[in-house]
Amino acid sequence: MKPYNYILSLQKQLDAAASPKTKTWWERYLRGVAAFRGVGIPQIRDILRSWRQDTGVAGLPEDEQLEIALACFDVATTEDKLAGVLLLQDYLRMRFDWRVLLPRYAQLYERNLIYDWNICDWFCVRVLGPTLEEIGMPFARALSTWRSSENLWQARSAAVPFTKVADNASYYPTIRVVCESLIRRQERFAKTAVGWLLREVSRHDADFVFAFVEAHAESFSLESARNAMKHLDRQASKRLIEEIKRAEQGGGESPPAARQPRTHPARRGTDPLIADVRLRMVREYADQEGGIRASIYGAAGAMTSRVQSCGTDV
């Protein structure tokens, strides 16, 4: 059976589990950037477990399983791409030499199959990050070269996986180089990757983060600076925050990416649909890494007065 036929079988099961409310929530939140079926991560993982056995995918040669996993990214809907992420994370990533996989991963960006922060960050924290933890510096050096990619999401993926090793000072020279490259870019999601990564580093080395923000203050957006210094001493970081705030508000025309609104128009008021989906998503995603979890909480929490928002890492 060709990969296409296996994926058709998977799609039928995903459709059967889809929730229109979840689909609506996510498509509103991502403002039409990505299409959704309306299936949660725990459901996708359960479906994959049974699908691998029922279709015989689990018994295929590993090379064929890899092709099926990567082919999932060709499908436009988010849940299919997440299925590819989970197949790599749970079954395949550890069975191949990382030097074989990294070029295959790069092709996902080159072919524009990863094109929003949601899939990008899932791929980073579930596939690239764990590989970095396991392989160490050789993988770190190779991954850091992505910082120069013209593709925003590939460049972002040079930074986000390092949140997994933010407690290890041996990576800080590489983290510095990656952050220097991304913070100079104008795209919002390049700068917020730096903010997220430095925030995690600050839990272990506040001086490193303060020195970096101070040296590159002119390149930080207020959003990314606040995130980077979230856990620093408030008095120590206040001066830098105020400088960046004044520059962003009164320093002439801001870059288009920096002026993008942080909230979605649908966040106004209390929508029972959003509230219902919000509460279900808290249960479904409660086990995910801080970056993605906070993104979900921050976005959904602002949409309803029933639950407090807890910020954003995007």
Image: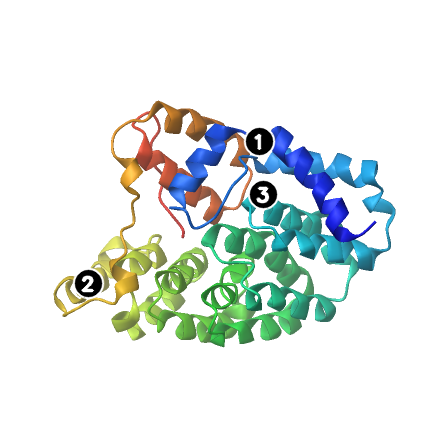
Q: Which residue occupies 50% across, 60% down?
A: 160
Q: Residues within 10 Å of mark 3 (few under 14, many from 20)?
A: many
- Residues 174 and 46: in front is 46
Q: Is residue 144 above or below residue 65?
A: below
The residue indicated by pointer 2 is: 239
C-alpha distance separating marks 3 and 1: 10 Å
Residue 4 rendering spot, x and y as whole percentages: 73, 50
In this view, the mark in front (2 or 3): 3
Q: Which residue occupies 56% across, 59% down?
A: 113
Secondary structure at badge 1 equals: loop
Q: Residues within 10 Å of mark 2 (few under 14, many from 20)?
A: few
Tell me which label, 2 or 3, sits earlier in the chain: 3
User: Would residue 307 be visible to someone looking at this image?
Assistant: yes
Residue 24 rendering spot, x and y as whole percentages: 44, 34
Residue 18 tag number: 1
Amino acid type at circle 3 is Glu
- Residues 195 and 26: in front is 26
Amino acid type at circle 2 is Arg
Drawn side of residue 262 relative to residue 166, left or right: left
The residue indicated by pointer 3 is: 79
C-alpha distance separating marks 2 and 3: 43 Å
C-alpha distance separating marks 1 and 2: 49 Å
In this view, the mark in front (1 or 2): 1
Q: Is residue 51 above or below residue 30?
A: above
Q: Which residue occupies 42% across, 35% down?
A: 25
Secondary structure at badge 3 equals: helix
Drawn side of residue 197 relative to residue 260, left or right: right
